[in-house]
Image: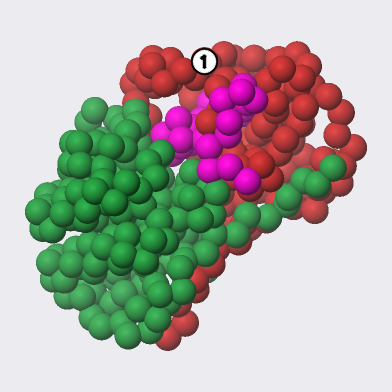
Chain colours: A green, B red
Amino acid sequence: MNFPRAITLVLPAWAVSFLRAARCFPTDQDKMGLAIELSRLNVTYGTGGPFGAALFRGATGTLVAVGVNRVVAETCSAAHAEMMACMLAQKRLGAFRLPAKGNYVLASSAQPCAMCAGALPWTGVRRLLFGASKKDVELCAGFDEGPLHPRWKHEFKKRGISVTGGLMRMEARAVLARYRETHGTRY
Amino acid sequence: MNFPRAITLVLPAWAVSFLRAARCFPTDQDKMGLAIELSRLNVTYGTGGPFGAALFRGATGTLVAVGVNRVVAETCSAAHAEMMACMLAQKRLGAFRLPAKGNYVLASSAQPCAMCAGALPWTGVRRLLFGASKKDVELCAGFDEGPLHPRWKHEFKKRGISVTGGLMRMEARAVLARYRETHGTRY
């Protein structure tokens, strides 16, 4: 019997060329703007669900990694944008936990689902920014966000992770709505 | 700058040879026995944390995939045993959601953390078996289980996933205790 031993998850080619033109992203708006742009391009290019994320070094806003939803393309229910960005950042830095001194910031176009919110405390990320809310994701795009801890922001705070939500929410919602209109796959 | 585009997560070589000798695992005890054996071997061979998981087709108990904790080896905080098993099963079956007709069962040597519990509703798994409890994991091995939903079993039930915990708990705990004694990496 054929038992695969390895899992490989790959970003779409456009994301790489996008990365090569990397600029600095000093403000929260800059960071969120990139996350939303990634979500938009993922829909435009048909390379995955309407979600984007980007990971930055805190002090400088240097881009470390990006992620987009790759669930369908990689036949992997865990290949959410936030997971992709965090796994790629850890791989790049050779650290299973991003070092505290980097004050790493994750910007996600939408509020993390239960899996991604559960994953973040292990990543070493110190700050989370997100755009669209859980309700936006459920209403605009028809996705279930799963069994998220009802006080997840408080749980994050206890673990030293600050959260700022609703940043550029209208822009983030617009991508979700566009995805719904184009009848994209929901899961 | 070097931006990695792909993440690859690999099982240790012993797990593959172990898989090749695959037997059938009809009962819950059989399934849990395999998950605990995987956790034990992962400690013995020094290939990761004290956690193992295995995924089976429900009706027959046919082994579909196995997973062990690979966080340190793969510098990836998401490489938990349950995530590895589910991702490998989805890859093997070419499905981002395991089909309902397979009634797939995941056996995990320990209660899933917040990330893995958040991930399971997306995998298509219909039944979860686990051995050691959250407290066992926290007390015996010193791991934090994260912001798990306080009523996660109820949330699973709402989504059609049944849960049986505490199976062969003493055997599962013994692996956690042994890991603690050997001063393994905690994260």
Q: How many marks?
A: 1
Quadrant the N terminus of chain B occupies: bottom left
Residue B29 seen from this side: no
Q: Is residue B73 shown above or below A31?
A: above
Q: Position of residue A105 (x, y in %)?
A: 27, 62
Q: Which chain contains the residue that carries disc 1?
A: B
Q: Is residue B94 shown above or below A81?
A: above
Q: Position of residue B51 (x, y in %)?
A: 63, 36
Residue occupying image coordinates x 87% and y 28%: B23
Residue occupying image coordinates x 80% and y 53%: B13
Which residue is under mark 1? B162
Q: Is residue B146 shown above or below B152?
A: below
Residue occupying image coordinates x 63% and y 55%: A7
Residue B12 seen from this side: yes
Q: What amino acid is at disc 1?
A: Ser
Horizontal arrangement in the rendering, residue B144 relative to residue A107 (left or right) = right
Horizontal arrangement in the rendering, residue B12 relative to residue B181 (left or right) = right
Residue occupying image coordinates x 22% and y 53%: A178
- Whether the magenta-drawn stretch holds residue B95 is answered as yes
| SS assignment at label 1 | strand
Identify the residue at the far front of this view.
A182
The range drawn in magenta is: B94-123
Identify the residue at the far right of this view.
B21
